Every structure is written in C-alpha cells, then in structure tokens.
Amino acid sequence: MNMKVLIVSKTRLYNERCVGGLREDGQSVRLLTPQGNNQPLNTQFDVGDVWELDMTPRPNCVPPHVEDVLVTGQEYVDECENLTEELLQRVAPWEGGPDSLFDGHLRVTGNDHMYIRKPWVPDRSTWFWLPDRDLTLVKNGNKCYYAYPGGEEIKYVGLMQPIDSIPAKTLVRLSLARWWKQEGADDTLEERCYLQLSGWYS
C-alpha cells in the first residue's frame, strides 16, 4: 500500500519513539519499522510532516492496536501549514467527558488512571478528543498527567513541553498503551491498556 500520511504524534517510549499518522483516507496508522519495532530516537518523522509511505499491515495485530503498519519505503512530501485546521477537517473527534472515549469501555483505577481490559476492547487504540472541560497538569515525580475535573488522570507521553492547563475544546490526541501487567502481580489481575495523552493542537 502506498499513500500519503500526515504525522500527528511522536511520543516517548523508553529508547524509541512511537509515531502516529493519519492516512489521506482518514485512517489512523502507527508507523513501525520493517521489523515491527517502534521508530528510533533519530527518526525523521516529525509532527506536521506529510510523507509518501509504502506500508504493510503488521501481521497478527492484537486488538485494539489495529493501526500498526510496517513502513517499507518513505519519501518526504511537505509540511502541513495549519495542522489543527487540517485535522478538524479530516476527522470527527470524540466530544464530551471521559465516558465518550473508546466506546465507553474505559475503567478507572484506585489512583484515578484510566484503562481498558478484556473482553471490553474498542475497535481502535488511537483517536482525537475535544474535552468539554479544562485538563489540568498534575506532576508525580518525573511523570506528568492531565486531570479531568472528575478526578480521572491521563498520562502525558508527548514530546512538547507540558503546559499548566489544556483548555476545554482543544483538540488532543489519545492512545492506549500496549497490553501490560505489572511483573509479580497477583494472578487475578488482568492485563490492561492504559490511556495516554500524546499531545494537543492549538
């Protein structure tokens, strides 16, 4: 498959970068290397860039991470002049509170972090949101979260400098982390995909 892709997110992941894109037909993609790994730290993909990509769906994708594609060829095309305007023309973001996200499947931990669990798995792991309330920055050690007024917190994994508050109706991008279970956890604890905030567009 060969198609133009707009780069919409670039997030921290250990010693790699997780890069998200939007195909010209409006479908989200997560850009992996031909070997199925995340992009290296020195990846050329930057938010706002448009690339012509040769892509192959990742074999044996595990839902909800159905956006995974292997990038086998790439050619830089251009830079998007107004990313926010372009996105709002091309996507229909979720609107409202956290209950409007990911088919309403999100649950909340005792420390206010949101996640999904089986068998309540949405049909995607990334999308856009127009929150109906301000999201407020909360720092916990070297980790940053954005809190909804109801108390729910979303881990911030983007590369932009955190701001104290993301105003209501600001377009943000969300993603679900890979399935994970804490090492040594009780056998009764299920694997989870935790909600993350990749960045905002203003």
Image (cartoon, rainbow, N blue to C red):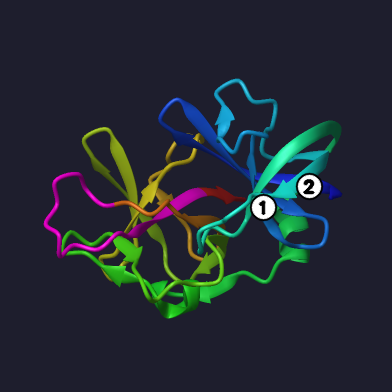
Q: Percent x, y for residue 187? A: 14, 59
Residue 8, magenta (yes or no):
no
Magenta range is 181-198
Secondary structure beneath label 2: strand
Using a 10 Å C-alpha cutoff, classify the residue at mark 2 as few (fewer than 14 neighbours), some (14 to 19) or many (20 or more).
many
Residue at image position (63%, 51%) is 59
* Mark 1 residue type: Val
Question: Is 141 or 41 nearer to us in this picture?
Answer: 41
Q: Which residue is mark 1?
A: 29
Q: Percent x, y for residue 13? A: 44, 35
Secondary structure beneath label 1: strand
Residue at image position (49%, 64%) is 168
- The image quadrant of residue 133 is bottom left
Question: Is 189 or 20 nearer to us in this picture?
Answer: 189
Q: Which residue is mark 2?
A: 5
Residue at image position (82%, 62%) is 25
- The image quadrant of residue 77 is top right
Real-space Cα separation, disc 2 to disc 1, in angstroms: 9 Å
Residue 48 lies, with reference to residue 132, above or below; the image says above
Relative to 3, 10 lies left or right:
left
Main structural element of the magenta stretch: helix, strand or loop? loop
